[in-house]
Amino acid sequence: MSNPNLIRLSVAAVLAASPPAVATPQATDLDEVLVTGTRTEVRLAESLLPAEVLDRDQIERSQARDLIELLRGRAGVDVGNTGGRGKLSSLYLRGAESDHVLVLVDGIKMNSATAGMAAFQDLPLAQIERIEIIRGPRSSLYGSEAIGGVVQVFTRRAQARGLSPQFTVGAGSHGAREASAGFDLRGERGWLGVHGAYDSTDGFNACRGSGALFQGCFADEPDDDGYRNVSIGLRGGAQLGEATELDGSFLQADGENAFDGSWTNRSRVRQQVSGLRLRHAPRQGRLELSAALGRNQDRSDDYQGQELRSAFLTRRDSASLQADLELRAGHLLTTGIDHQRDRVDSLMPYTVDARDNTGVFVGYDGKLGAQRLQASVRNDDNAQFGNHLTGSLGWGTTLASGLRLSANAATGFKAPTFNDLYYPGSESPWLQPETSRSLNLGLSRATASHRWSLDVFESRIDDLIVFVYPPPDFLGVGSNIDQARIRGAEFGFDTTLAGIDVSLQLSHADPRDRSGGANHDRVLARRARNTGRIGLDREFGPLRAGITVNGAGARYDDAANSVRLGGHATTDLRLEYAFHRDWTLLARASNVFDREYETVAWYYQPGREYQLTLRWRPAVR
């Protein structure tokens, strides 16, 4: 889809986005709460930031098998994958690098201190209650890594009083097998949730490369590349008094992954996130206090056959204090301090293997009539790179007919990872932090019958880190190119027409190298400039049917734009049949037209696949 076509389609959608009276969405659609954008609760319909919330019902209704599949094609989101389930996956938010997306799990940073990005492919959907996506920089509240935006995952937590058990089992194409079970228990002053899940697939041949140099995976292994994930999630808490609440969470996901490669072809990984939060919020008071401790551990052991070739364990320990003061009705002041310590243990010694970062932030959220103002500023003191000051300023107003106009300006930064700086054989200790400046203009409308939003944005990233590979040093040497510029637009529309739930999302992002060198004005690698997603769902009594179409335009696999990967569109069909008040049968066919495509050169994507799942969840009586 060309850029002019996308713009014309967006304009036409805006002009048509005020339909006559139709079936009304649930009230919770308009009352949805967002916490990631400001670190405090804000109604999604009133957010000045481009954002999306996916709750447990939406996750289950999608029948997606992993987080990458669930997020593909949503506003501002593009993905790259190296061969199916469990394989290394990159998530590009608004055209920024995958390691420019900050990932939080229950408020705890999950990004790896070595790789920089989070292991999206290993986060099990069975453990997730809710996902919030913020598009645009949030370094002014979270510090490093939030240049492109923030994705926060909230693990399962007891919602209703009493005992709520559940169980699922399923099977599908390529030897796919899944099972999950758990329960939530909530009493008058406490709650507990325990959930476990198993997910595996025999996979398919992920790579079409050969043993020739620079061709795909550097190996000729035409075998199936399987994946297995075993996870457990624990969450509990207690009301210690009328105003004090203690909440703890633990998530561990163990994965085993087979792939093609000349140096390693099998890995065992562990993602572990644990946290403890104490919150004091007097009902009649104007001051709310919270304190949190967290740890994220990311372990990866890589093998060639049975021989261990490399092992990495990164730990990120964090502590934070936050105070929210209501100055007066409609005016909230937030301030706090975060401390973080990163450490790397590896079979290959790093020149530097630990560092600390302390961030202090202040935020304000205020309403005055139809006007709303949000502002935040943060200073990060990094043990290696000194102080970095970031800020954001947002303004919004309500116009006639429920229209909302908003504008946001923000700065961001990202500190180089340990791999960027000190990976053995590829050391680049001269690298400096990446910095960014972004502007977003938004227009939206949310009513009882429909909602739509249109955002246009521009981001400029200075000192963008890239690696060049001069022979014979094939490990690469890092450098800070002068600048990258990303311009784009996003459109979203949701309504119900003739009983059909309709969801449309279109995105355009044009990420360009502006360094002035040989690749000046080239498109940054592995990102499609145009993506889109449309979903249709309809209930027929105990039966629900749905269809999702995902599309992405062409992309380039290299910085010089010499390797072009064609665009693609896939169609997924799904059915749910509640044959008993406690039992539901789910069926899914993905990529039903068996499209062949690649999002990373040389790596296949799944063809047509089928999945059948049985779910037991006692209805509330």
Image (cartoon, rainbow, N blue to C red):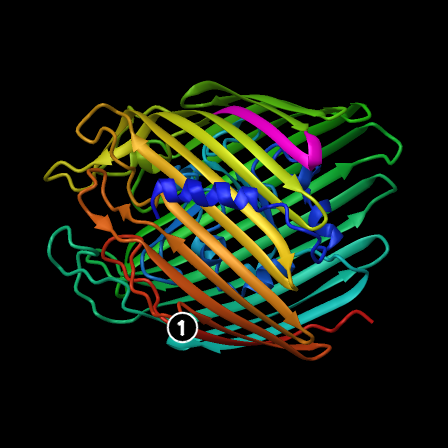
- Range covered by the magenta-colored residues: 399-411
Image coords of residue 61 (percent x, y) = 59, 64
Task: Determine whether 373 is above or below 255 in the image.
Answer: above
Residue 116 appears anywhere in the view: no
Give the residue number, with chain letter if any, for mark 1.
609
Q: Nearer the viewer, residue 287 or 382?
A: 287
Task: Determine whether 242 is above or below 303 in the image.
Answer: above
Quadrant in which the C terminus is drawn: bottom right
Answer few, some or many: residues within 10 Å of disc 1's Cα (few below 14, many 20 plus, some between 14 and 19): some
Q: Residue at x 49, y 26 (%)?
A: 439
Q: Write down the quadrant of residue 405 in the picture.
A: top right
Q: Residue at x 88, y 41 (%)?
A: 242
Image coords of residue 578 (percent x, y) = 66, 77
Overall secondary structure of the magenta section = strand
Residue 278 appears anywhere in the view: yes
In this picture, residue 412 sits left or right of residue 46: left
Task: Determine whether 192 is above or below 100 in the image.
Answer: below
